[in-house]
Amino acid sequence: SAVISQKPSRDICQRGTSLTIQCQVDSQVTMMFWYRQQPGQSLTLIATANQGSEATYESGFVIDKFPISRPNLTFSTLTVSNMSPEDSSIYLCSVDQTSLKTQYFGPGTRLLVL
Amino acid sequence: GQNIDQPTEMTATEGAIVQINCTYQTSGFNGLFWYQQHAGEAPTFLSYNVLDGLEEKGRFSSFLSRSKGYSYLLLKELQMKDSASYLCARMSGGYNKLIFGAGTRLAVHP
């Protein structure tokens, strides 16, 4: 199975600032996904990150607020821009390994915006 | 979320069997996942079903009926450590994205 790491694991930020979250995988994967999990809730897909093209965003999420980079097949970043307390959440990346019939999640980044 | 329904909470006794049901919208269906999530941790993959029938993996089994838009996760010989949230997720679209249900919080008591 893929080993996924995220940086930072947690952060406390001031409103109006931006935070970039990194996701690193130990093998090349085609699809990487970014999810948000707000307190007490399930996971919501933010966007799909494809290498070599712009990310595909879900309804309610826009590139200006959540810019995503995918420079190669093992790495992606998600930036949470101009943060507000409502952005306090856990942000998780996942990778699709269809050949193994599964999707694995990274450990998550716990963000608190004051 | 997005027409995936599962019970909010369930309780069960240590050593017993529990079945967690999930119904989903069938259009654009590419597969059904179950994840376990302990408080404060990331989801852990449990099972993936794309064909009808039962997939057994140790104490955990997952069932799928594509025509009915229905799945269940069966947990046998429950242990206290099985207390967690269980997330049903439907795979859809060309990019294999996952759409999650709200999750079922399972409490196992002695």
Image (spheres, grey):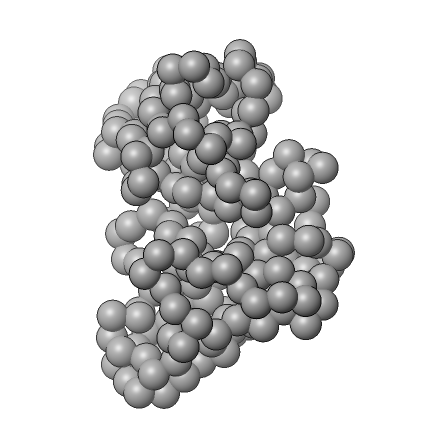
Q: In the figure, residue A5 lies in which quadrant?
A: bottom right
The answer to which quarter of the image holds residue A88 is bottom left
Q: For the N terminus of chain B, which image quadrant?
A: top left
Q: Quadrant of residue B26?
A: top left
Please give the name of the residue rendered at 68% of the width and 67% of the height, measured from the top-left corner: A52
State the residue in front, B56 or A97: A97
Q: Is residue B79 left or right of residue B55?
A: left
Residue A37 horizontal/vertical position (percent): 36, 56
Observer able to see residue B72: no
Residue A53 seen in render: yes
Q: Position of residue B86 (x, y in %)?
A: 39, 35
Q: Looking at the figure, which quarter contains the C terminus of chain B?
A: top left
Residue shown at the point (67%, 63%) measured from the top left? A51
> In the image, B24: left or right of A103?
left
From the viewer's perspective, is residue A1 above or below residue A70?
above
Residue beneath the point at 36% across and 87% down: A17
Residue A28's spot in the image, x, y percent? 75, 56
Question: Seen in the image, is B49 located left or right of residue A19?
Answer: right
Q: Residue at x 31, y 87 (%)?
A: A16
Depth check: A87 or B99 in front? B99
In the image, taking residue B97 as reference, residue A15 lies left or right, namely left
Name the one closer to the observer, B27 or A85: B27
